[in-house]
Image: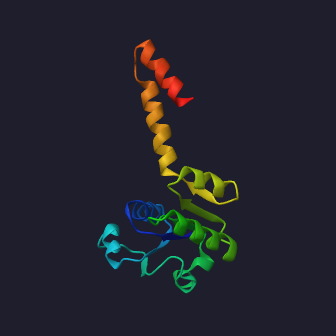
Amino acid sequence: MKALVIGCGRVGSSVALQLHNEGWEVVVVDEKEDALTRLGEHWPGAFLVGHGMDVDLLREAGIEQADAVVVATDGDNTNIVIGQVAQKRFGVQCVVVRVLDPARARFYAERGLRTVCPTSVAIDTLMEAVRACELPARATAAVRAVSS
């Protein structure tokens, strides 16, 4: 299986390393050459320097043979556009896009783009943690009222 990871920050590099450890052939694209250091000095996959919206660079990275594309740059708009290009122009079946804004994540998910919203995940996890606390009845009622 071949994966293309666009963005080599904390998230993108971690996904790339995990995919590699699971046996995927991984190509990583990032604008900054020094982002390669996040993958470690013995990174066995390919690493291309450039912008993920550059169609020629995507072709060079092998998007036309990719089974999956993960887009995790630091910009929602960039991620969404790259995700749509991968999905619609290149026909990649599995495209997963990180979108920080919950409203945008929902909007594009409703239109067929697979989005992951860390903001929503954090909110849900924090609320579950608060609800799991043993609080006096008055505080528990206040937490329920706020979350409604």
Which residue is pictured at 62% across the width and 79% down the height?
64
Residue furthest top as drawn: 137
Which residue is pictured at 70% across the width and 58% down the height?
111
* Residue 34 vertical placement versus 136 (above, below): below
Report the quarter where the N terminus lies: bottom right
Foreground residue among 76 and 62: 76
Foreground residue among 6 and 102: 102
Image coordinates of residue 98 in percent, x first then y, are 52, 59
What sort of colour scheme is used for the picture? rainbow
Image coordinates of residue 80 in percent, x first then y, are 58, 65
Image coordinates of residue 74 in percent, x first then y, are 44, 64
Quadrant position of residue 95: bottom right
5 left or right of 109?
Answer: left
* Residue 105 vertical placement versus 34 (above, below): above
86 left or right of 38?
Answer: right
Image coordinates of residue 10 in percent, x first then y, are 37, 61
69 left or right of 31?
Answer: right
Q: Across the whole image, how many numbered discs are drawn on residues?
A: 0
Report the quarter where the C terminus lies: top right
